[in-house]
Image (spheres, rainbow, N blue to C red):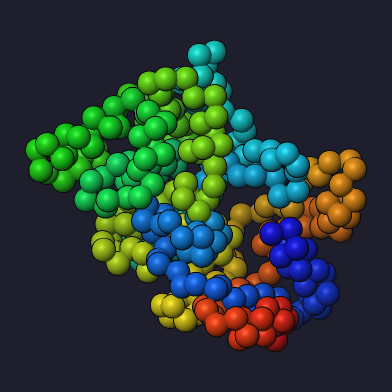
């Protein structure tokens, strides 16, 4: 993975500023879609991780792994018993413009994470990712799911639960049944599955949401030919976010990357073209096409 990162960053440094920077890459198996609640394959998740944004992410060069805020304003406030997590979200983060927002910019708020996490509990979605939330034990979430199953009625997204609340516009609070010292790493990090979706967008596209991912991330889905090609383009409205990393002092490769790219604005490429090539020989030829137009 670090070799791919190095190839991308070197591409960024070798292309003239006036030319578009394009990364071409091949997947060895087909994607399934771009609704985080439905994903198990690594190829779809590789795409959603650049469209959506979780509260936290991983330092790209730190070894061992280290969590850093992404849409969160800082580290969570954690109770002494590791059962209450209070997280402040950075103001001024916006979803990509979409007709579902009726032409107005839509700011990311704490309620978006409440809604997105609840989607994994919705029995109608049969999310393969529900088990991680069930194990985390958000107070009231499993009971809300069971209520929908027992009554055979739609999942009630508006029902308040103690374990998952927006205290105000920018403050999210999570409470768990048991102590969860690793909750941030297990449930709150990883933009591929834990990114925020806007309820308006999900309701607007219905069962077509897997083809219409709308997030706050650095890239947008420009085009998609199922099992053939995926094209991502830079989110031109993406907030100012600069490359930062914390490699170990004795990590020569990591230190070299940091020295070269520290402080550059993200994303550093303009377009990503992903080909789905299951045959070995054409795939290797595609790997050689990390170039610019």
- Residue 39 position (above or below residue 119): below
- Residue 118 position (above or below residue 103): above
Q: Quadrant of residue 182?
A: top right
Q: Quadrant of residue 249?
A: top right
- Residue 31 position (above or below residue 245): below
Q: Residue at x 86, y 58 (%)?
A: 260
Residue 226 x %, y %: 41, 77
Q: Nearer the viewer, residue 213 or 237?
A: 213
Residue 10 x %, y %: 81, 68
Question: Is residue 80 shown to the viewer in this render?
Answer: yes
Q: Residue at x 50, y 54 (%)?
A: 192
Q: Indicate left or right for 240 with 53 as reference.
A: right
Q: Nearer the viewer, residue 249 or 98?
A: 249
Q: Quadrant of the C terminus?
A: bottom right
Q: Quadrant of residue 137?
A: top left
Q: Nearer the viewer, residue 106 or 165?
A: 165
Q: Nearer the viewer, residue 143 or 173?
A: 143
Q: Residue at x 46, y 73 (%)?
A: 30
Residue 16 x %, y %: 81, 78
- Residue 67 position (above or below residue 216): above
Question: Is residue 160 shown to the viewer in this render?
Answer: no
Q: Quadrant of the N terminus?
A: bottom right
Residue 212 x %, y %: 38, 66
Q: Indicate left or right for 81 with 158 as reference.
A: right
Q: Residue at x 69, y 40 (%)?
A: 65
């Amino acid at each position: 993975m670090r070799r791919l990162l190095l190839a991308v960053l070197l591409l960024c440094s070798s292309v003239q500023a006036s030319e578009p920077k394009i990364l071409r890459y091949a997947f060895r198996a087909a994607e399934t879609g771009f609704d985080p609640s439905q994903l198990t394959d690594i190829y779809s998740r590789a795409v959603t991780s650049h469209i959506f944004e979780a509260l936290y992410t991983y330092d790209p060069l730190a070894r061992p792994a280290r969590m850093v805020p992404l849409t969160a304003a800082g580290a969570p406030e954690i109770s002494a018993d590791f059962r209450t997590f209070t997280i402040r979200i950075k103001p001024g983060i916006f979803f990509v413009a979409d007709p579902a927002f009726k032409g107005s910019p839509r700011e990311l708020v704490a309620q978006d994470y409440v809604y997105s996490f609840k989607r994994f509990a919705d029995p109608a979605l049969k999310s393969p990712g529900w088990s991680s939330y069930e194990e985390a034990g958000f107070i009231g979430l499993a009971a809300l799911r069971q209520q929908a199953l027992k009554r055979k009625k739609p999942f009630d997204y508006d029902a308040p639960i103690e374990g998952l609340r927006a205290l105000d516009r920018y403050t999210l609070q999570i409470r768990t049944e048991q102590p969860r010292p690793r909750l941030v790493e297990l449930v709150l990090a990883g933009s591929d599955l834990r990114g925020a979706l806007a309820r308006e967008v999900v309701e607007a596209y219905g069962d077509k949401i897997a083809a219409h991912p709308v997030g706050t991330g650095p890239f947008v889905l420009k085009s998609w030919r199922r099992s053939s090609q995926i094209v991502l383009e830079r989110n031109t409205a993406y907030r100012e976010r600069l490359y930062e990393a914390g490699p170990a002092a004795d990590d020569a490769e990591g230190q070299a990357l940091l020295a070269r790219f520290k402080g550059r604005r993200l994303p550093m490429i303009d377009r990503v073209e992903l080909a789905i090539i299951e045959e070995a020989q054409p795939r290797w030829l595609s790997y050689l096409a990390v170039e610019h137009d």
